[in-house]
Amino acid sequence: MTQTTSDFAALPLAPELLSNLGSLGYHVMTPIQAEGLPSVLAGRDVIAQAKTGSGKTAVFGLGLLSRLQTSDFRVQGLVLCPTRELADQVAGEIRRLARSLPNVKVLTLCGGASMGPQLASLEHGAHIVVGTPGRIEEHLRKGTLELGSLTTLVLDEADRMLDMGFQAAMEAIIAETPVNRQTLLFSATFGDAVRPIAKRLMRDPITVEVTETHDATTIRQHFYRVADESARFEALLRLLLDARPASSVVFCNTKRETDEVAEALKGAGFSALALHGDLEQRDRDQLLIMFANGSASILVATDVAARGLDIAALDAVFNYRIARELEVHVHRVGRTGRAGGSGVAYTLVSEQDDYRLARLAGLLDDRFEVQPLPSPEVLKQAPFRPAMVTLQLGGGKKHKLRPGDILGALTGDGGIAGDQVGKIKVLANSAYVAVRRDVAAAALKQLGTGKLKGRSFRARYIG
Ligand code: ADP
Ligand code: MG
């Protein structure tokens, strides 16, 4: 391996890009950035493999921005992502990286949004398009997107796109791009599905890989035996009531189980939400907002649904059922204790799972034991409620509402203290604000009866 430095200044980046990195708080490169950026900026095809949260977006984001000719409004960069949330996150990160450059247009094109505004935006031209394969392919078929001037193609979370059945769409899109393009492929894993695609699509690629394993001091893994299926849910309850994590994900292996477990947790008095692929986009957005702002404490999810989402600060991960593949297990567990914090993972295993446990023991360097569950006494405790609740407002960016307007309405004559207000998220037609549970009624009244930007908007409590 070549010697790498972690100083961004060592890279051939425009001074505006460099100084902006400092203002974003990016003072040193993450390992995958240090390994990948030199080759990306040199124009090479690159395969980059590193776990979620390792800073892969900036590797291709800086690559895209460095090559951009802003005077040319044809599409020069295309980023394919598996889901709309990821596309939104990636577009947001590219815009942040680009904010010191004048007039860079980044457009997201995803399914679940209407075509009209997308067509209008495309007519105005865009330098970088970020989107999901299905919708991008649709635009290409209709002739509303033209990729003849593309210089860089990025496949983000390539493994997940393949898992989600996007292979045909991806290939159709790639067939519309110039052969002399630069291709960058990002993936948390590089298994048998991704490898042949990479081989076909890429020219003499450089592979960079960062496989830091979590050390046992940051993530503690606990395993518990369940006698049979009927004991599984009670085991989860006991663990939750004993550990009382403010924010956790419970992983299930099927959508159906996700719904069942979330319902049962709600029945037991917890604030739990089920996240799976069948949700309407709007419900999914709302659910993730509620989880991120601390007004839902437990997210029950399948791997596909939870993959790649930038959920920060999970106190605990529960494996309601151990993952079928060890790689997936490691990925799940890695979601707790991010960014140097400590985390804990609880895994329920029945006798049928023993062979998986045995394989896992081979993978983890340290030894682990199956532990006894907390005593049933703990079931007498009351379930915990999240500190925040979410209020939804019937107005958003389209009504020129900004977070500051909402905060001002609540704290001004609303009489609510600033520290009782949590995250505020403004979408196109609605906005979500988290407030502390004890001021929820007052906040709702204030938003529902007061005026914002000289208008009154509907306000409702959504939990
Ligand atoms: P990945 O795609 O590998 O999952 P992301 O690109 O989404 O990771 O980055 C994860 C988080 O780390 C983001 O919030 C991003 O803003 C932040 N980040 C990326 N690079 C740096 C850096 N060099 N210094 C500090 N924070 C960074
Ligand atoms: Mg990513």
Image: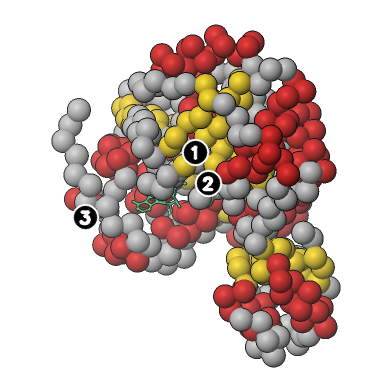
Q: Report the residue at 48% width, 31% height from top.
A: 221
Q: Position of residue 106 (x, y in %)?
A: 53, 55
Label 2 Cα crowd, 10 Å radius (few <14 / some 14-19 / many 20+): many
Taking the spot 71% from the left edge, 74% from the top edge, the residue there is 439
Position of residue 180 measured from the top left corner of the image (x, y, whole percent): 40, 32
- Ligand 1 within 8 angstroms of badge 3 C-beta: no
Asked which secondary structure carries label 1, the reply is: strand
Q: Up-down: is 149 above or below 403?
A: above
Q: Residue at x 45, y 60 (%)?
A: 96
Indicate which disc, 1 or 3, sits on the residue closer to the N terminus.
3
The image quarter in which residue 60 lies:
top left
Residue identifier under label 2: 315
Which mark sits nearer the N-terminus, 1 or 2?
2
Q: Which mark is residue 344?
A: 1
The disc at residue 9 is 3
Residue closest to the eye, 210 or 302? 302
- The alpha-carbon separation of the residues under discs 1 and 2 comes to 7 Å
Residues 196 and 291: in front is: 291
